Amino acid sequence: MPRDKKPRKSFKERWAVVKRTWPDAMEILAPHRKLWGLGLALLLIGRFAGLVLPGAPKFLIDEAIPQKDFGLMATIVAVVLGATVIHGLCSFALTQTISKAGQRTITSLRVKLHSHVSRLPIRYFDDHKTGEVTSRVMDDVENVRNLVGTGMIEFIGGLLTAALAFAILLFLNWQMTLTILLFLLIVMFVMIKAFMVLRPIYRERQEIKGEVSGRLVESIGGVRVVKSYSTEETERVVFKSGAEKLLKNVLKTINGVSVLALTSSVLVGLLGSTIMFLGGAQLISGAMSTGDFISYVLYLGLMVAPLSSIVMIGTQLSEVFAGIERMNEILGEKTEDADEETKDPVPPITGNVEFENVSFSYIEGKPVLHNISLSAEPGSVTALVGPSGSGKSTLTGLIAGFYMPESGRVLVDGMDLTTVKIHDYRRQLGAVLQDNFLFDGTIRENILYPRPDASESELKEAAQRAHCLEFIDRFEEGFDTIIGERGVKLSGGQRQRVAIARALLANPRLLILDEATSSLDSESEAYIQEGLSLLMKGRTSFVIAHRLSTIRNADAILVLEEGSIVERGTHAELLERGGRYFDMYTKQHGLEANLFLAPGEKPRHESEDGEENEDDESTRRRKANFARLLSGE
């Protein structure tokens, strides 16, 4: 859930962030230079046209009405009407062009972020929640809309209108205008200060939203686990905690904006009162005409009115810079193919895999694999067995190039995986995992996922070899059946068979199987074992197995414990050795080796000192006899 509140940055630090982020904002605007030029032209025309209406009363009241000049009055009305139409048309065109440009920018930025995220290493996703990453791609980018969209234009337009109105006010009565300059400086100071305070609050909100969304995605994705353990109340409490923290942030923002709006209103009220007093005095003294005063007040309103919108848009621009900063954080993460141009292409591989003293850890100082060395010949089957947490999945992750070793080398056909184009390599890799991910789409789309251009005959052949046709033919829509999110409309065995068909269609040179038949009943397992045998034929395969009966024919079995290979050999050799594999196999089959003891022989683990005695001749003889019996099953 959301982390503890971070210390608030100082003004200097916040300003440094704005300065650091500004070039990135300009880079986002760069592709829209021409459109922005058009927008600014429309803005200028519209704003100048908007200045006509406040100036009209001066001529109407001071000239047309006293002289009873209907022609002049009609001209004034026509000019005002024309200027109003021009102002309206410019505003319409501005909204159409700039708003659409903003939406196009959001789309392109989301595509850019998604492309970058999809190329990040697996370690990034190990450390970040799905919902948090999703929030970066969707919500943070949405905040940038005001940079290219109407937000920035309105901000500039408001400043321009205020500046033009101020210039006209100076012309009409410079003494009164200089008097209000003090109020304007105070308003500008308050706004700048407010922007600096609100920006980190908006940034914190995005972080909280990302974390709350991450937990929400997890709880919905794991709804079956939640309901299985009746932990709905726990999830409600956890989500409520995050939602309330988000609420506090929003309320803090509302308070800040409200105080800012109140301050602005008070300053504007003081400004208006001052002008009324000074203007009234000038009218009484005859220094200003009635038309001049009315125009002055209207221009004053034209100058002051944008200030409130500038305040609101300014807070939105604070969100823009917060969003850009968070976007830069993820764009600053190094992708797997960052140095692709300096690496070697991967030709078609034969599948010779070697580990040379490989060590790896997820957390520094806590190694998961220790000095692993192994060799797998092309077309061989290497099985990985051991208790949970022994490093089996990590080892296959290194084979797949998901992780790179901290020391040692992983070689494929003599090529160090750290020196080759990883995507070239993975195109020749296939995987069938214990919990295979299926996309929300049709069976056809999921099988064709690695090769969308495969023919219909290739699709059906893969489905047939994986024994998918047995259930596909029962669906009314056949291959076009929608299977739902993560394949929820299929049974566990059906999902596994679709995943196997997907791997068959990919036709990889290297194959990773993580208990690929774990979700199948015994009849389906027999069919799939036949399909997997065909799939593994001629391909280098690494099989993570929990049911040891499925790997009896493996070319090599590696027994891992606490990140080290403690035994290696064939099924028969490991049983003959009578070590860890022997223990695992006998326990898994419900066999008790002590049943084969000679008369008077002590059971294993019951030596006089309470420790097992592997060197005891009778123990070795017992194990050897038992192993021969097992090998002849």
Image (cartoon, rainbow, N blue to C red):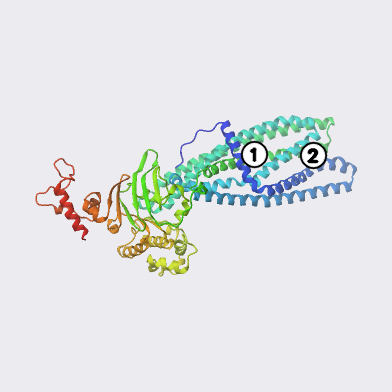
Residue underneath mark 1: 311
Number of marks: 2
Image quarter of the N terminus: top left
Query: Quick check: 480 above or below 125?
Result: below
Mark carried by residue 625? none
Q: In this rendering, which labeled residue sits more in front, label 2 or label 1? A: 1
Q: Report the side of 12 relative to 366 (left or right).
A: right
Residue plotted at (47% across, 66% down): 480
Q: Report the side of 195 relative to 439 (left or right).
A: right
Of the pair 213 and 425, the residue shown nearer to us: 425
Give the image location of residue 17, x and y in percent: 57, 36
Give the image location of residue 614, x and y in percent: 18, 46
Q: Amino acid at mark 2?
A: Ser
Give the image location of residue 252, x and y in percent: 54, 37
- Secondary structure of the residue carrying numbered label 2: helix
Q: Report the side of 533 relative to 415 (left or right).
A: left
Instruction: Name the quadrant containing residue 478.
Output: bottom left
Give the image location of residue 441, x and y in percent: 47, 61
Q: Are marks 2 and 1 in contact (CB under 8 Å)?
A: no
Q: Amino acid at mark 1?
A: Val
Query: Quick check: 510 above or below 358?
Result: below
Residue underneath mark 2: 295
- Secondary structure of the residue carrying numbered label 1: helix
**Any part of residue 391 in sight:** no
Query: Quick check: 299 above or below 182?
Result: below
Q: Residue furthest front?
A: 414
